[in-house]
Image: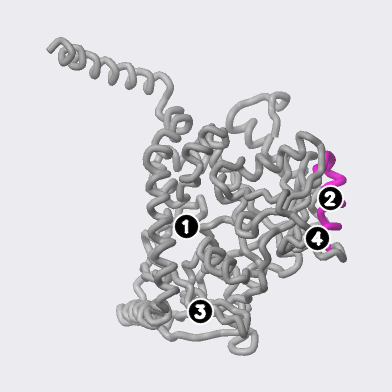
Amino acid sequence: MECTKSLYYLIPTILILLFSWMRFKGLEYILINYRWVFVCLFLLPISVAYDTFFFIRSKLMFSTNTAPKKHEELVEKVQDQVLQWNRAGRPAKMCTARPGWQNISFRRGKYKNSLTNIDVCLRDILHVDVERKVVRVEPMVSMGQITALLNPMGWTLPVLPELDDLTVGGLIMGVGIESSSHLHGLFQECCVSFDLVLADGSLVKCTKDMRSDLFYSVPWSYGTLGFLVAAEIKIIPAKKYVKLEYIPITSREDLCELLPAAASSDERFDFVEALAYDENRAVLMKGRLTDGEEGCNAKVNAIGRWYKPWFFKHVEEFLERNQAGVEYIPLRDYYHRHSRSIFWELQDIVPFGNNIIFRILCGWMVPPKVSLLKLTQGETIKRLYENHHMVQDMLVPMDKLGDSLACFHKEVKNFIVSKLKIKVADIQV
């Protein structure tokens, strides 16, 4: 009885103290600094269940050859919706019905609220043709799906952007680039054909030799020319590992010299990438595909394992030691090296996420789905992202690399000064 009375008084007291603390700190402070509680308790388990379900579904659809049979039916449904839109007098422009929170971008797709939404739910790998060396896929197929299927078969894409959830449709209609692009170009340059439903409801196929004007106009068109319903993409033989060389760099001049040299080298590196940690400090990485003929078993680093450090933190260690190194990384681990930390976004959501204890206990659930993070943001978080969050994602000519680094460094400082009212002397970018 006494225990019940104590609880009766204790719970309201805790709630009052919690409310007072929230009022004192401010709602924005709570949402930013303690969002990890919601992410760890709810979003991580939901993300695991989501990924598991779609992994099993994808395997079953391909192994039972169900996807090709359903594809024509689903495309006809897309055509029916477009024809119905035409019969209605084209009341508003069309767009896909995929909610804005489901895409990988931080941008909020408010335009969908005022347009005619067309359901284009096509998410399966249709066929792997090893004779023609192409894979036929639907637009919502993700990079994670493709590597999970192709790599065990001994194949891969020439250009495979690193985040698991990036989709074929987004990479074709927008832009896709990877550390192999110095050899193979952008993602769309690896595509052989596109199937589109046009505004009149017709289904057309275009290649470089057939409807070539449409074929070369689709990339970067952002869905303005038609609804992509299938694409054929080149595949190349895969190997077990990437032999990756890490080269720490401590001056902007060295980076501007060494990065272009590695990309244009006659030694033909399969992958070239650099991570810049500030205006002058970076790590250059040069990779080659290998099956391990060099006796690499003792040097294998499976960076994709849940207990391993986040990749950008692992790379930074070579910079801190100012020591070059070589590792053999399993191919799929290399492809998705930035997925577990969502590049470096996750450290702002789960500040202790790279701690070894967290990685061992909960690392197998990381990362939370970007789509779920967006869905559960709330208006306050959305406003904070819009006003205080910066995403650098741009293409610049290689000969402007030095100017770009200087510009980024300057603008980030100005951004911090203007938004957070911090003295320039106190800033470390």
Q: Which residue is mark 3?
A: 127
Nearer the N terminus, badge 1 or badge 2? 1
> How far apart are the two marked residues, 4 and 1, measured between alpha carbons?
31 Å
Say which element carries label 4: helix
The residue that disc 1 covers is 103
> Which range is magenta?
248-264
Nearer to us: label 3 or label 1: 3
Where is residue 171? Give x, y as percent. Answer: 57, 65
Residue 49 at x, y = what percent? 38, 52
Report, in whole angstroms, how far the alpha carbon at label 3 lies from the one at label 1. 25 Å
Whether pointer 2 and pointer 4 mark residues with C-beta atoms closer than 8 Å, the reply is no
Q: Which residue is mark 2?
A: 256
Q: Quadrant of residue 87?
A: bottom left
| Closer-to-camera residue (13/47) | 47
Mark 3 in CB contact with mark 2 (< 8 angstroms)? no
Disc on the earlier residue, 3 or 1: 1
Q: Quadrant of the C terminus?
A: top right
**Residue at the image point whose x is 47% and y is 39% from the top:** 362
Looking at the image, is mark 3 or mark 2 nearer the viewer? 3
Instruction: Check disc 1 and report its element: helix, strand or loop.
Output: loop
